[in-house]
Amino acid sequence: STPPDIHMYCLSQGICTFENAILEQMFSERFYSQVLAEKRQLGRKDGPPHQVLVVPLHSRISLPEAFRLLQDEDLGTVHLNERGSTHSFMLLCPRLKHRCFFTRVPPHLASLWYFFRVTVTLPSLSVLFIALAVRGLSALPPKKQVDVRKKLSKAVEKRFPEDKLLLLDTQQEAGVLLRQLANQKQRHLAFRDRRAYLFAHVADFVPGEESNLVGTLKISGYVRGRTLNVNRLLHIVGHGDFQIKQIDAPMDPFSLNPTVSKSSKEPTMAMEVVAADAVTDMEEDLKVLMKADPDRQESLQTEVIPDPMEGEQTWPTEEELNEANDFLKQSSKVVKKVPKGTSNYQAEWILDEGDESSGEGDEYDNIQHEDFMEEEDSQDESSGKEEYETMTVGESVHDDLYDEQLDEEAEQKMLEKYKEERLQEMFPDEMDTPRDVAARIRFQKYRGLKSFRTSPWDPKENLPRDYARIFQFQNFTNTRKNIFKEVEEDGAEGAEVGWYVTIHVSEVPVSVIEYFRQGAPLIVFSLLPYEQKMSVLNMVVSRNPGNAEPVKAKEELIFHCGFRRFRASPLFSQHTAADKHKFQRFLTADAALVVTVYAPITFPPAAVLLFKQKSNGMHSLVATGHLLSVDPDRMVIKRVVLSGHPFKIFTKMAVVRYMFFNREDVMWFKPVELRTKWGRRGHIKEPLGTHGHMKCSFDGKLKSQDTVLMNLYKRVFPKWTYDPHVPEPIPWVKNEASIVPEMDVE
């Protein structure tokens, strides 16, 4: 006796069991009810206001004139005075039962990125085109307005397919814009929904008793994301991690239902007066919501204090090394049947398969040189003469300015990087053996591997001292899952989403409030457990197609990982599923790579942006991606390829030179396997003479134009160059030196 609606639901979803159908329907109803409740709460009196960004794309755009159109008495909109120093203001719409917080963003990419991380509504780019279109259409003839509007709509659809071009010419069109902002489809970010965050509307600084440079920072704003716990650490974007003293609950100065004086004739002025009175009465109605518990408050410790006696390693004695050498000699002896009177040296050249060399006549093989064919000269015959026109080009007045701005030293360094990148593409990992230093000394940290994929490598051996300073999870996946589960089921007391609160942050430098008073954004995030501790982060990134400048490994880059930004010198490695990952010397454009750095722990998912600071102070976007894992055991293996050339070839044996330059190096690298570019594999039999020549045996016939290679590997680690202080980028400016002079055509 199953209800008919359950039967229909089973048929539509392809579910056979009624129990699964009931659970599925209950889950969908719960999910849609949560989405609907969240949509109804956002922008209303019980939820945080809509956060709308406004980015002018042209210097001649007048934002105050555009915002005046939003102050419509019929819609009941109210423009409150600016609060704080972030060029922001609140727009109340009692008739629509919504409120929006407009913020003007400085014209550089870094500030845009910070604001986008906390913006709930993302239609601001549409506002940019609206402001531009209004000023353009109002000054054009009526017939031309249609063509201009079509071109603008086409440009908007190409970059933003989901957005439409709206006009902001009349107050009726302003009402349409406000309704679109209120009903905008919300795009959730997983890392943001699992943490409490806040955009500062007002900030105040109270100097400390001991020094005026450090004190308590009071930040007021609306709680978003999750419940804000006073015992959790707080991250101020761009300034570091801090502890919270207490959380206050003042009166909301931007309420949708303020008390309006009946004697007032102009609603806008009355509302502004009430809002100002609310600000003065905030301290009288102030309520202390929570105070930090010293026993439960999280620590600011970021690194482990290493024990110098922990992990002490013992090295083998000389007796143990001699025993190992004797064992290798005994195991390397092979019994062969040789003619009577054959010396040991001659016996080494006799192969086990019984193949005999043909003497000096077979010293060099007859090989068809297919890859060295002569090039034929080709002449281009033109069918007709091309027509030319005479042009008089004026002298460029910007040549001197261009030469003054040119940095010759930077140009030379960039040329060297381009050469290195090109050589790396043509000859991957190949390196010339140094002649002034013995190879056994230069490559003493390298080892040979039978197979890069299957050969064992202990991830705990020969770790650097910096690994004693970091934190590591026994099982990062399970820890992340448990923390997220606690966040979902967290019923602890705190500031709920939508509350207007004041956070008291302790031990904050005075530079933070100075940064805020200059008009920069102040954004704070509540940290999850362990997110203040240092570890090794691995991020998957792809090269930005618009940036062709070579980026070398261990070069300083600026990271935007989730809510953090910092500077570090990363390693690049291949993105594979194996236990060992090959080191990449440059950030390639044809495949995604993994970036490895020392940085504070961040639980994925989290978006990643990589910037590079230019000499003029601007930040150039290099790559984009996401956080992969927090795993210090991920092994990045650097490969070095030493090359040698066959000197004498005797079927499957050959004399190779130029790989080493002394006898001791040949003996040192004798156990390492050889390979050739044409797919042959072999090993070193013995050294010949004292100049680095060596006799080698291969698994097949060797070609004279082939190249003998030896692969050496070592594990590499990132440098501890983490720096949370990132210099502010300069705004986008027009480069006067790049202006092309006009040409007069005769």
Image: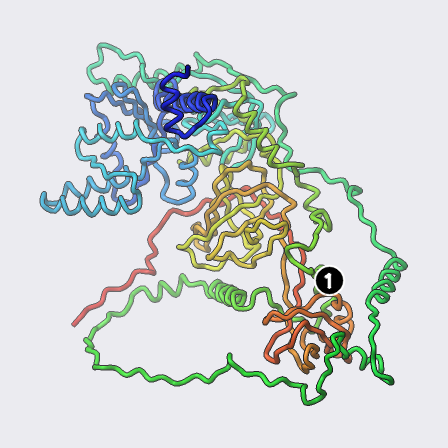
Disc tally is 1
User: In the structure shown, which secondary structural element does the residue marked by tag 1 occupy?
Assistant: loop
Can residue 332 be seen in this snapshot?
yes
Tell me how the rendering is colored. rainbow
Does 150 sit left or right of 287 as displayed? left
Residue pictured at 65% horizontal, 64% vertical: 711
Does 369 sit left or right of 733 as displayed? right
Q: Quadrant of the N terminus?
A: top left
Q: Position of residue 367 (x, y in %)?
A: 58, 83
Residue pointed to by mark 1: 444
Query: In which quarter of the view is residue 691 placed?
Result: bottom right
Q: Which of 189/450 is in front?
A: 450
Can residue 520 be seen in this snapshot?
no
Query: In which quarter of the view is residue 439 placed?
Result: bottom right
State whether residue 727 is above or below residue 488. below
Disc 1 residue crowd, few under 14, some 14–19, many 20+, Cα 10 Å: few
Residue pictured at 65% horizontal, 21% vertical: 295
Amino acid bearing label 1: Gln
Q: Position of residue 276 (x, y in %)?
A: 34, 19
Residue pictured at 81% horizontal, 80% vertical: 345
